[in-house]
Amino acid sequence: MDIATVVDLGREALWMTILISAPLLGVALAAGLLIGVIQAATSINEMTLSFIPKLAALALVLIVAGGWQIGMMVDYTRRIFERIPQLFH
């Protein structure tokens, strides 16, 4: 196994991580920003008001995009397992 293969495997793993986590992180960021603006405008500083809507938004995203995320992880794992024989010859 040469250095280029290791770098390629690492790059591919990081890219998969970004692709799979991007929908959740984006929705959490948008929901937190929206709730923060609403809290600043109304001067309500209750922690549960930011946590519960963010949790609901993340649950909705998991319902919508969860199948896609699992499919991406399964495809990536399958590709890694298919590459194992080529790594050590």
Image (cartoon, grey):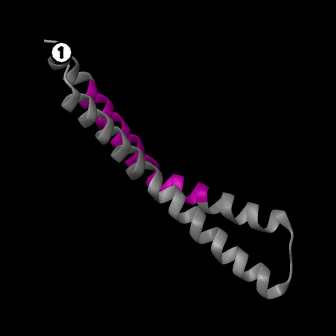
The residue that mark 1 highlights is 85
Where, by quadrant of the figure, is residue 60 drawn? bottom right
What amino acid is at disc 1?
Answer: Pro
Q: Where does residue 7 sit, x and y in percent of width and height?
A: 27, 35
Where, by quadrant of the figure, is residue 57 drawn? bottom right
- The outermost residue toward the bottom is 41
Q: Is residue 65 magenta?
A: yes
Left/right of residue 63 with respect to residue 56 in the rendered view? left
Q: Where does residue 5 sit, x and y in percent of width and height?
A: 21, 29
Secondary-structure class at tag 1: helix
At label 1, counting other C-alpha atoms closer than 10 Å, the crowd grade (few under 14, some 14-19, many 20 or more) is few
Where, by quadrant of the figure, is residue 81 drawn? top left
Q: Where does residue 70 sit, x and y in percent of width and height?
A: 41, 41
Eyeballing the image, is 87 above or below 70?
above
| Nearer the observer, 70 or 79 | 79
Eyeballing the image, is 53 above or below 79?
below
Eyeballing the image, is 87 above or below 47?
above
Residue at x-position 67% and y-position 62%: 54
| Nearer the observer, 67 or 14 | 14
| Nearer the observer, 1 or 23 | 1
Residue at x-position 18% and y-position 15%: 85
Residue at x-position 53% and y-position 58%: 25
Q: Main secondary structure of the magenta part?
A: helix
* Rendered-image quadrant of the N terminus: top left
Left/right of residue 13 with respect to residue 26 in the rendered view? left
* Rendered-image quadrant of the C terminus: top left
Residue at x-position 34% and y-position 47%: 15
Left/right of residue 38 with respect to residue 82 in the rendered view? right
Q: Which region shows up in magenta?
A: 58-80
